[in-house]
Image: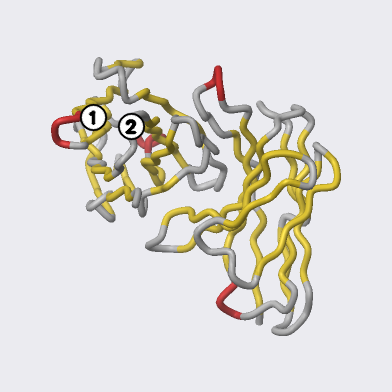
Amino acid sequence: DAGITQSPRHKVTETGTPVTLRCHQTENHRYMYWYRQDPGHGLRLIHYSYGVKDTDKGEVSDGYSVSRSKTEDFLLTLESATSSQTSVYFCAISELGGRGNEQFFGPGTRLTVL
Amino acid sequence: AQKVTQAQTEISVVEKEDVTLDCVYETRDTTYYLFWYKQPPSGELVFLIRRNSFDEQNEISGRYSWNFQKSTSSFNFTITASQVVDSAVYFCALSDSGSSNTGKLIFGQGTTLQVKP
C-alpha cells in the first residue's frame, strides 16, 4: 500500500472557524491532490499540487486554500468553514508517467461543520 | 469539457448473478486514461484498473472484466458470479494523458452495488 496518511480522520467544527487538513506521503510522489466526496457527485477535485510551492485550482476550489512547503506534505485549509463544506475529504498522490496517472488515495477525513 | 456519467445509481443483485456497471465518458482529448475504483463500506478507495485510450482490448481479472469501446465512449465493468464481498460503491474516472497532463481525475457519480446472499 502507498504510504499516505491524513489527519485528522474525523473532525467536527462550527461555522466560521478555520480548519486545516493534512496529507502526508512517504512515496516522494510529485503530484498531490485534494478531493471531496459528496452523495450524488462522486469525488470532485478541490486543488492539486505539481511540486513544492506549485499548486493550482480544481473544479470546486472556492472557500479552500492549499499549501505545499515540502514534498511530503499537502495542507488543505478552510479559512472560514461553512455547512456546505461538510464532506469526506480524500488526498491522493501520483507520479504520472510510467504508472499512467494512477492515483493512490489516503483513508479520508470526515469533516462535519455545524 | 470532460465528463463521466454512471447512470445507474444503485443496483441490487442476488449472489452468483452477473452484473454490469455502465460508464460513459466525454472528452475532447485524443489521449486519455480511464479508471475504475472500488469503495467498500469501510470507506477507502481501491484501484481496480487503468485503461489507456490507445488500448481497446478487453481485460479480464478473475471474476472482473472490462469492456472499453471508443466508438460509444463507454468503459463498462462486469462482475461475474457476484459475491457479498463485492458490495461497494464503484467509481469510473477519466484523466488526460497528453502534453498538459496533470493527472487530474474526473469521477462519475458512482454506482452502489448491493449483493444479497
- Near-viewer residue (B87 or B50): B50
In this rendering, the answer to whether A38 lies above or below A2 is: below
Residue sitting at 64 percent across and 72 percent down? Answer: A63
Label 1 CA crowd tier, 10 Å (few <14, some 14–19, many 20+): some
Please give the label number shown on residue B89.
Answer: none
Residue sitting at 85 percent across and 41 percent down? Answer: A70
In this rendering, the answer to whether A14 lies above or below A93 is: below
In this rendering, the answer to whether A78 lies above or below A22 is: below
Residue reaching furthest to the front: B99
- Circle 1/circle 2 CB separation < 8 Å: yes
- Label 1 vs 2, first from the N-terminus: 1
Q: Chain of mark 2?
A: B
Q: Secondary structure at mark 2?
A: loop
In this rendering, the answer to whether A14 lies above or below B56 is: below
Residue sitting at 63 percent across and 46 percent down? Answer: A33
Q: Secondary structure at mark 1?
A: loop
Both marks 1 and 2 on one chain: yes
Residue B47 rendering spot, x and y as whole percentages: 49, 31
Please give the label number shown on residue B16.
Answer: 1
- Near-viewer residue (B59 or B117): B59
Going by the image, does B83 lie left or right of A74?
left
Toward which corner of the image does residue B50 lie, by quadrant? top left
Residue A15 rendering spot, x and y as whole percentages: 70, 84
Question: Which residue type does callout 2 highlight?
Answer: Gln
Going by the image, does A92 lie left or right of A29?
left
Q: For mark 2, what is the residue?
A: B83
